[in-house]
Amino acid sequence: MLRVDHVTQRFDSGSKTLTVLNDVSFEIEEGTSCAIVGPSGSGKTTLLGLCAGLDRPTEGTVELCGIDLGPLDEDERAEVRNQHVGFVFQTFRLLPTLTAVENVMVPAELRGTSGARPRALDLLERVGLADRSDHYPAQLSGGEQQRVALARAFINTPSILFADEPTGNLDEETAATIEDLLFDLNATSGTTLVLVTHDLELAARTARPLRLQRGQIVEAEAMAAG
């Protein structure tokens, strides 16, 4: 489902070159779950963006759903994401002028899928927001907005879901609810899950926790040891 092969990412910072990721390689099988953990500034979000084709690595290759992203231009990578990828972000990223159900429908409408509204309403019901479908983001709590974002992520039944600190802006009780919904939706959809988190308990719920350390991946066994 996802293959990262000898990926390095460097950024120019003034007169210096900053290496954020250094020769990172790993594979994630279809239908499994993986967490990428590490301290702030360790490159977790950078790696997630490379895996999803939002950016290109300085060196190395990323293969997503059997597609080598390297030769693709920005529009072609966007099409791969539209066809195969779902996203959940820490900051929800809902459109303020659209209702909850309209926000959920956006990815399906971009794909040109028919019957988007009934599916969006069904997903909102599954995340416990059937009675809030016509509310705008400003009328929803943070937890409710993240539930809308979860429903939106699954509207196209993605092959792979990338979640970047999905509970980072939520209180402990709300975060636990969102985590349960995320894993439940993921299991029933058969989606591959890759999430970035600083929460080791959340990471432990995935099949394969990985840690970023000094720009390199450390397997779960090393996490337990140190």
Image (spheres, grey):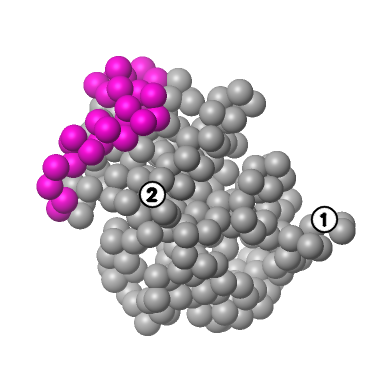
Q: What span is colored magenta in the figure?
A: 112-140
Amino acid found under the numbered disc labelled 1 = Ala
Disc 1 residue crowd, few under 14, some 14–19, many 20+, Cα 10 Å: few
Task: Give the camera-side residue of 162 and 14.
Answer: 162
Q: Secondary structure at mark 2?
A: helix
Q: Amino acid at mark 2?
A: Ser
Between residue 77 and residue 112, name the one nearer to us. Answer: 112
Query: Quick check: 148 above or below 14?
Result: above
Residue 68 within the segment the image draws in magenta: no
Whether residue 207 is visible here, answered yes or no, is yes
Alpha-carbon span between mark 2 and mark 1: 30 Å
Per the image, the residue denoted by label 1 is: 224
Left or right: 52 as drawn, with respect to 165: left
Label annotation for residue 154: none
Q: Position of residue 70 (x, y in %)?
A: 42, 79
* Front in this rendered view, residue 112 or 1: 1
Q: Is residue 223 left or right of residue 14?
A: right
User: On screen, 176 above or below 196?
Assistant: above
| Residue found at x 57% / y 63% | 47
Of marks 2 and 1, which one's residue comes earlier in the chain?
Answer: 2
Disc sitting over residue 189 in the figure: 2
Relative to 209, residue 152 above or below: above
- Is residue 127 inside the magenta stretch? yes
Going 79% across and 62% down the picture, which residue do you hit?
221
Specify the farthest residue to the front: 188
Residue 207: where, in percent of width, then height? 62, 56
* Residue 33: percent from left, percent from top: 55, 56
- Say if mark 2 contacts mark 1, CB within 8 Å: no
The residue shown at (45%, 75%) is: 63
**Residue 42 seen from this side:** no
Residue at x 87%, y 58% (from the top left corner)? 225
